[in-house]
Amino acid sequence: MQKIKHTLLFLGAMLFLNVAFGQALPDTTKNTDPSLNGQYQFMLKKSKSFNGARLINPSRLSSLWKSVSDTLRKERKQLQEARQEIKAQAGNISSLKGEVNGKESSLANANAAVNEIKFLGISFNKGTYNTIVWAIIIVLGVGLAFVIFQSGKLRHEAKYRTELYQEVADEFQAHKVKAKDKEMRLARELQDERNKWDDGRGR
């Protein structure tokens, strides 16, 4: 805030000097750096000295003042939004802390009730229950491994039967092709013989 106050005082003094001397020329050049520092440096670069004081172009000073005002307004708006967001987040954190405390209390109650386990209306000690569960899991795992092994054997047998069937089918197809070729050859030979016989009778 002190830096902003100094900047505002400096800008006010510059504005006063401009009004007092009134010898600034119209602004005919353009600044390529739109930042506050760029505008400030451009204004200093284009200003003239008079008896140890700087003569600032009023349009440049007005433009810098507008930029400073816009920047301050933007920063204040962002600060207000940040404060609102922090406030909302603080409310969320407080709510989450309440939920965590409630869950911790529920967890403590659950841990207290875990000492005794009931299954199918029968009470079990926690260690005994875990032993029974793991025994069931191991038995099921062994059964699953056996089923997978048997399935592998059956798949191997099915693959063998399929390959055997394919071989028989290929042999049968080859036999059909050979038989068809033989049939066509015999038909041609029979036709040739008939043609010869017809030619012999025609003479």
Image: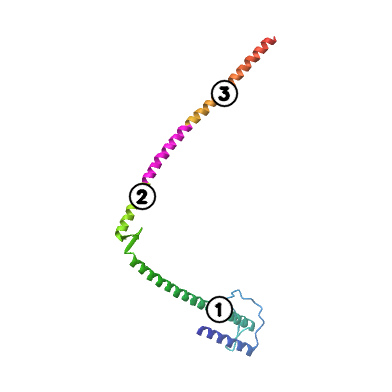
- Percent position of residue 43, x then y: 60, 80
Residue 178 versus residue 38 in the image, above or below:
above
Q: Earlier in the sequence, mark 2 or mark 3?
A: 2
How is colour applied across the structure in the image?
Answer: rainbow
Instruction: Say if the magenta span includes residue 161.
Output: yes
Asked whether 10 or 90 is in front, the reply is 90
Name which residue type carries label 1.
Lys
**Residue 53 appears in the rendering:** no
Name which residue type carries label 3.
Asp
Asked whether 136 or 10 is in front, the reply is 136
- Percent position of residue 77, x then y: 55, 78
Q: Secondary structure at mark 2?
A: helix
State which region is magenta.
Answer: 145-166
Mark identifier at residue 140: 2
* C-alpha span from label 1 to label 3: 95 Å
x 52%, y 27%: residue: 174
